[in-house]
Image (cartoon, helix red, strand yellow):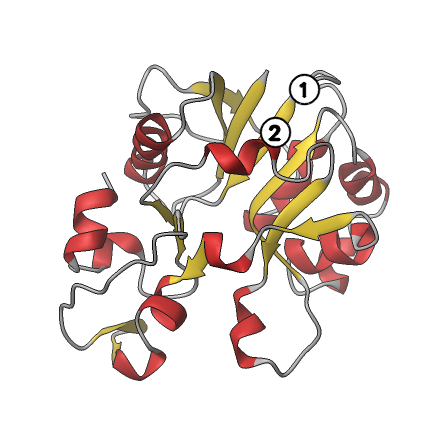
Amino acid sequence: MLNVICLKHGTKYGANYVNNLYSMIQRHLTVPHNFICFTDDPTDFNPSISVRILPNNPVQGWWWKPYIFKRGHFYKEDINLFFDLDMVIVRNIDHFVNYNSGKFVGLEDVGRIWGTRPPKLGSAVLRWQGDHYEHLWNNIEQDPGICKKFHGDQDYIWSVCREQIEFFPADWIRSYKWEIRKHEELVRQGSGYNFKNIANPIIPTETSVLAFHGTPNPHEVMDPVIVDNWR
């Protein structure tokens, strides 16, 4: 079975982010699947979403992502496809399911566009087989200090699994603010950034997923392509 998975912890994102991701998956994935959200609070979720309640544990925020790999969450034959909540899906994603079948595949970090550092993982989109890689969570249970040794979960996952990880084609997932629009179009607004104007950029035909990272978030962008798809 295919499991499409997301994670909501704390209050950074509301239930609407989970519900909108669920809705986008239903529109753009034809492969039969379960949609699962690991969360500490399922209030106002679409009732069709399967919920896995996070246990009591001192880890916070993105450090819950390795928990998804804990043994027992999935069957050996399962295919697991994870999306961060701040992704906007605009076209069919069936090809994400079987690309490099059996491999651990992820987004190449969007910092790739600067060409100033070696490739590394961006954990906003991940796909792996069954209950493999359970050591990602076991390590943290045995040594919670790991969470202080790395900037974030993706650096940790990359450090542990880089020999096994391959990347989705870069043009399948593009940074909205750096590759579809330009960082020069951003202006400071309060504690974050947003675009100085509304635009209607062309999305390349090979691009299915628009990655948001940092600010702005999808709900703050009024560009028609985001308003029409983030729902």
Q: Which residue is mark 1?
A: 74
Crowd tier of the residue under label 1, counting other residues whose Cα lies within 10 Å: few below 14, some 14–19, many 20 or above: some
Question: In screen coordinates, is 173 left or right of 58?
Answer: left
On screen, 46 above or below 100?
above
Evaluate if marks 2 and 1 touch, with contact meaning CB atoms under 8 Å apart. yes
Measuring 67% from the left and 21% from the top, which residue is drawn there?
Answer: 73
Question: Percent position (x, y) of residue 217?
Answer: 32, 58
Amino acid on which disc 1 is placed:
Phe
Question: Percent position (x, y) of residue 1?
Answer: 59, 15
Quadrant assignment, res 2? top right
Amino acid on which disc 2 is placed:
Asn
Nearer to us in this view, 136 or 170 = 170
Name the image quarter holding the C terminus: top left
On screen, 173 above or below 149?
above
Nearer to us in this view, 153 or 44 = 153
Quadrant assignment, res 223? bottom left
Question: In screen coordinates, is 192 left or right of 3?
Answer: left
CA separation in Å, label 2 and label 1: 8 Å
Q: Which residue is mark 2?
A: 80
